[in-house]
Image (tube, rainbow, N blue to C red):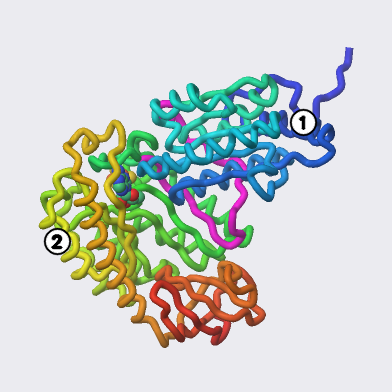
Amino acid sequence: MMTEPDNTGLNLSPPADEPARQFYFIGKCAELIKKRSEKLGRPMRSMIQTFGCQMNERDSEKLAGVMAQMGLEKAGSEEEADILVYNTCTVRENADKRLYGRLGVCKAYKQSDKEMIIALCGCMMQEEHVVERIKASYPYVDIIFGTFNIFSFPELLYKRLGSGERVIDIRKGADRIVEELPSERKYSFKTGVNIMYGCDNFCTYCIVPYVRGRERSREPKEIIREIERAASEGVVEIMLLGQNVNSYGKGLDTDITFAELLSEAAGVDGIKRVRFMTSHPKDLSPELIKVIAGNEKIARHIHLPLQSGSDRILEAMNRHYTREKYIALAEMIRAEIPDVSITSDIIVGFPGESAGDVDDTIDVIERVRFDGAFTFEYSPRTGTPAARMEQLDRAFVQSNFDRVLHTVQRISKEQAGRFEGRVMEVLIEGEDEKDPLRYTGRISQNNVVHFPKEGYDIGDFVNVSLDECRGFYYNGKVSGMK
Ligand code: 5AD
Ligand code: SF4
């Protein structure tokens, strides 16, 4: 007997290979979503809330891509969403607190809409104590998955839609890197590109190696192919993403350094600006500095986390450099790359840190003259070595934090002033939030510029005269298209 050919392939059993398997589940979810939308008399809607770093932002673009392909529309607010996803961060304790706060609000959503699906993913979900707490205290959470299987969201959602039961899938490590699934960019003109995952450095305060696993570099060919595709779709600025981009290439069959990859990425047709994040000072090579200096498409901005300016604390943090090495590196960067901006991350209150150690940190800030720096109070993370050390008095930490913050703010303000009066190239990123007649964009150094709209579009590069520096941003006007 002849049977009807199955054009969709959706009546077959799921393929074992990835990403084919997830494409299969995207199709299965789409069928269920269509049915439910018909029942509701309106399209089902989704919303993703992203906490934390650019890695999470990029992961959320991937989730958004698969959800769009399932036929889900975007919700205008959390309450309006039929599927609400929180992509979580756990780098510091206040990130955790924010999520628990949100989950309290979710309870009310769920009471007024029992059909709403709440999904949690990201770094926090890789911590056992978090998942235990959610299982015990937040019964209305429907799906929990981690950082190693973001790609399997379609399969997990299908299970939840089909069974109505809670689905939990947390993996201990990445047995494979699954790419090539749809993704939907937050901005049409710029995107992040993962070049590696995980981190092997085990700084003693940091939870990232535990929740994002061992360092894995992607094949350069795949990375370049992804950039070419993005460029063909209108992307002009990319940010190469990794926890420690300077050690890119380790473990690959292809012999390649980060500096080489960066050059190749900048050479892709249509790409006009390349950024990267984050550099570890211990691995930043003179070769990389030369490549940046010699290639105008590479942004004049290096984010180079200092963490501390005290040798004793740097050692306790397991950072593998000294204050003098850091200062020498920063000086070399400034000497070789004119107009470069150097930004940083600084932690105050690491166990054992004295007022003298903080003086050392302040001294490095003054010598390097950071163009900007994020200053964090040390936050003990369960499972990390530093969390087991004796912790400092909070009031003492707070006063040290204030000292560091004031220094950072004073110096970055002074630094920003150095471009006042210059004409610089700006990528238009959007409308100024405070004034619909103005645009907001960024110069290569990453400083923000506001200027009147004059017929150009979001995603265009324009030359702007930076007339007035307002501390952390400029007011300017367009002096011509690039
Ligand atoms: N406490 C405070 N800050 C931290 N960071 C990472 N872990 C911690 C922690 N436990 C900071 C570092 C890092 C940035 C992303 O977050 O400065 O560079
Ligand atoms: Fe954390 Fe250090 Fe790895 Fe950065 S390099 S993610 S601070 S362990």
- The residue where tag 2 is placed is 359
SS label for mark 1: helix
Mark 2 and mark 1 lie on one chain; the one further toward the N terminus is 1
Which residue in the structure is indicated by mark 1?
31
Give left or right: position of 113 versus 395. right
- Answer whether residue 244 is visible to the viewer in this image: no
* Secondary structure character of the magenta stretch overall: loop
Residue 193 lies within the magenta run: yes
**Figure quadrant of the N terminus:** top right
Q: Residue at x 26, y 52 (%)?
A: 347
C-alpha span from label 2 to label 1: 62 Å
Residue 202 at x, y percent in the picture = 26, 39
Dot 2: element: helix
Assign the C terminus to one quadrant of the image. bottom right
Residue 322, given in percent of the width and then of the height, sits at 14, 55
Residue at image point 42% right, 40% down = 97
Question: What span is in magenta?
Answer: 171-198
Looking at the image, which residue sits at the far top?
Answer: 1
Q: Which of the two residues, 20 or 463, is positioned nearer the viewer here?
A: 463
The answer to whether one can see residue 305 in this image is yes
Say few, some or many: other residues with alpha carbon within 10 Å of mark 2 (under 14 / 14 to 19 / 20 or more): some
Residue type at mark 2: give it: Asp
From the viewer's perspective, tell me whether residue 123 is left or right of residue 76. Answer: left
Q: Is residue 154 magenta?
A: no
Q: Residues within 10 Å of mark 1 (few under 14, many from 20)?
A: some
- Residue depicted at 35% across the width and 80% down the height: 417
Q: Position of residue 71 (x, y in %)?
A: 74, 41
In the image, is the residue at mark 1 within 8 Å of ligand 2 by its beta carbon? no
Count of marks, rendered view: 2
**Residue at the outermost right position:** 1
307 and 478: which is toward the camera: 307
